[in-house]
């Protein structure tokens, strides 16, 4: 399939280029930018006048719910949501059922995803068997099966001996360990940010020190083992201060933030809105402002959707009983654009896009997030001027719950191309 994308504004954060130019695709790759190559005859021409053409988005955390939780979502529904959101590469955590702790399960998931012919799916393997925090998995075998790193998802490893062994093992082979810093005991069972609002609503709290204590421990273990660590879903100003110092010290460290935490605070819980029940919890305005500053200065490498589809039976419950999580694949682009828009010129469109493409791809170590000759043709074409209203019925994801229901957001994806295959298109 030869595709000619004409008259689009091509923004590529990886090369810091922003220009109206044509893109030519053949055999799944970008073969030219600007000038038409010799003997190129397009099978399909896409007129992108007035639209932005950028690298397909890379999402560092999207739960696809297969295997085991098909009643919440399926690969088919969630990969369709990814296409609607312009997400062409995504990383999925290992907290499926059964847990991704055996190579056969990983191979099966990769095969099922390939058959969908939509986004590239990069699984994280479980760091410990069953995510129980006790016995280490066979990381070498899991990597051979297609895992790009190892994670405990939302489970903690209470035994620091085990965590040290896991980091030692990973460091020996150069694997990256993806961890959400959360103390095993402090804040356990908490459902909201520890503060005046949680006290007033009578909700059990998760203090910021649940994050900072875990970070202190992890950094000591990293110094001892030399392991590479990616920190998932940082939520606090105090945590970001520690990460900034650790990065300056030279620890091999990256981190991301959930898109919800870029915009919302614990005040958005309102009157016990269970759509705002998230992990980690939404924190204070000071924390949210620190997140924005850390994205700007590079302390936070990437924004992820933290896509976690939850069904009505688990969400339409009293706040403390509801399952945490929100749908996000279709919102990732719009929430990044909103971050730039709300900054009133402080955050460029280039920077916002880099946090959901180039930088995210670098964190995951995957060949994506770039528009350049020779690169795989993973492309997102969107209309930056059109706004859309977030409504349950408008979402392709089987998960219809998000704290952004009712919001008007900027940016509508018009076409998504994966490896030169048009996987989503509303332009004809």
Image (cartoon, helix red, strand yellow):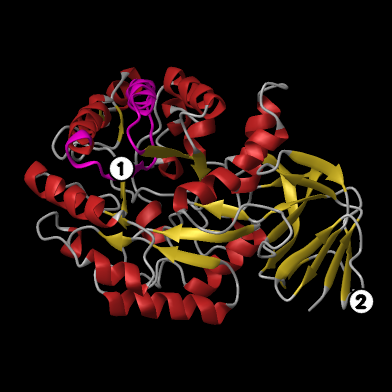
Q: Is residue 249 magenta?
A: yes
Viewer-side residue, 301 vs 77: 301
Residue 97 in view (yes/no): no
The nearer-to-camera label among 1 and 2 is 2
Quadrant for the C terminus, please.
bottom right
Viewer-side residue, 314 vs 139: 139
Please tell me whether residue 422 is drawn above or below residue 390 in the rendered image.
below
Please tell me whether residue 340 is drawn above or below residue 180 in the rendered image.
above
| Residue 47 percent across, percent down from the top left | 91, 60
Q: Is residue 118 magenta?
A: no
Q: Residue at x 59, y 57 (%)?
A: 368
Of marks 1 and 2, which one's residue comes earlier in the chain? Answer: 2
Residue under circle 2?
41
Report the side of 80 relative to 309 (left or right): right
Please tell me whether residue 413 is drawn above or below residue 265 in the rendered image.
below
Residue 31 in view (yes/no): yes
- How far apart are labels 1 and 2 at the CA level? 49 Å
Do labels 1 and 2 touch, CB within 8 Å?
A: no
Q: Residue at x 49, y 25 (%)?
A: 294
| Number of the label disc, if any, that sits on residue 180 | 1
| Number of the label disc, if any, that sits on residue 286 | none
| Residue 419 percent across, percent down from the top left | 66, 70
Report the side of 120 relative to 207 (left or right): right
Q: Residue at x 36, y 35 (%)?
A: 281
Say which element carries label 1.
loop
Q: Pointer 2: residues within 10 angstroms few (<14), some, or many (20+)?
A: some
Q: Pointer 1: residues within 10 angstroms few (<14), some, or many (20+)?
A: many
What span is colored magenta in the figure?
223-252
């Amino acid at each position: 399939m030869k595709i000619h994308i004409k008259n689009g504004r091509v923004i590529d954060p990886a090369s810091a280029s922003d220009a109206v130019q044509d893109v030519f695709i053949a055999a799944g790759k970008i073969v030219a930018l600007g000038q038409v190559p010799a003997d190129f005859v397009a099978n399909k021409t896409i007129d992108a006048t007035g639209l932005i053409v950028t690298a397909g988005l890379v999402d560092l955390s999207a739960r696809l719910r297969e295997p085991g939780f098909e009643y919440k979502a399926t690969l088919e529904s969630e990969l369709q949501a990814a296409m609607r959101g312009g997400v062409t590469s995504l990383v999925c955590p290992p907290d499926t059922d059964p847990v991704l702790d055996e190579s056969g399960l990983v191979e099966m998931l990769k095969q099922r995803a390939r058959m969908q012919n939509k986004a590239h799916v990069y699984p994280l393997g479980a760091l410990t068997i069953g995510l129980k925090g006790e016995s280490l998995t066979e990381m070498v075998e899991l990597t051979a099966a297609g895992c790009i790193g190892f994670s405990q998802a939302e489970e903690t490893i209470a035994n620091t001996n085990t965590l040290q062994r896991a980091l030692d093992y990973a460091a020996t082979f150069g694997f990256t360990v993806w961890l959400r810093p959360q103390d095993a005991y402090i804040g356990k069972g908490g459902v909201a940010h520890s503060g005046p609002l949680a006290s007033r609503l009578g909700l059990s709290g998760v203090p910021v020190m649940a994050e900072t204590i875990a970070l202190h421990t992890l950094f000591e273990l990293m110094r001892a083992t030399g392991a590479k660590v990616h920190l998932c879903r940082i939520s606090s100003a105090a945590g970001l201060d520690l990460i900034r110092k650790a990065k300056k010290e030279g620890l091999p460290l990256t981190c991301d933030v959930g898109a919800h935490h870029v915009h919302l605070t614990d005040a958005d819980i309102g009157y016990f809105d269970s759509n705002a029940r998230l992990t980690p919890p939404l924190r204070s305005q000071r924390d949210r402002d620190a997140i924005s500053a850390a994205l700007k200065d590079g302390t936070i490498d990437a924004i992820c959707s933290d896509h976690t589809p939850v069904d009505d039976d688990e969400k339409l419950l009293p706040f403390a009983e509801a399952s945490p999580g929100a749908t996000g694949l279709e919102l990732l682009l719009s929430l990044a654009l909103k971050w730039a828009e709300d900054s009133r010129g402080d955050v460029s469109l280039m920077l916002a896009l880099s946090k959901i493409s180039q930088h995210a791809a670098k964190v995951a170590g995957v060949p994506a997030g770039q528009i350049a000759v020779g690169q795989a043709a993973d492309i997102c074409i969107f209309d930056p001027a059109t706004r859309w209203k977030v409504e349950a019925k408008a979402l392709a994801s089987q998960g219809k719950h998000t704290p952004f229901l009712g919001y008007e957001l900027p940016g509508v994806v018009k076409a998504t191309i994966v490896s030169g295959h048009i996987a989503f298109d509303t332009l004809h």
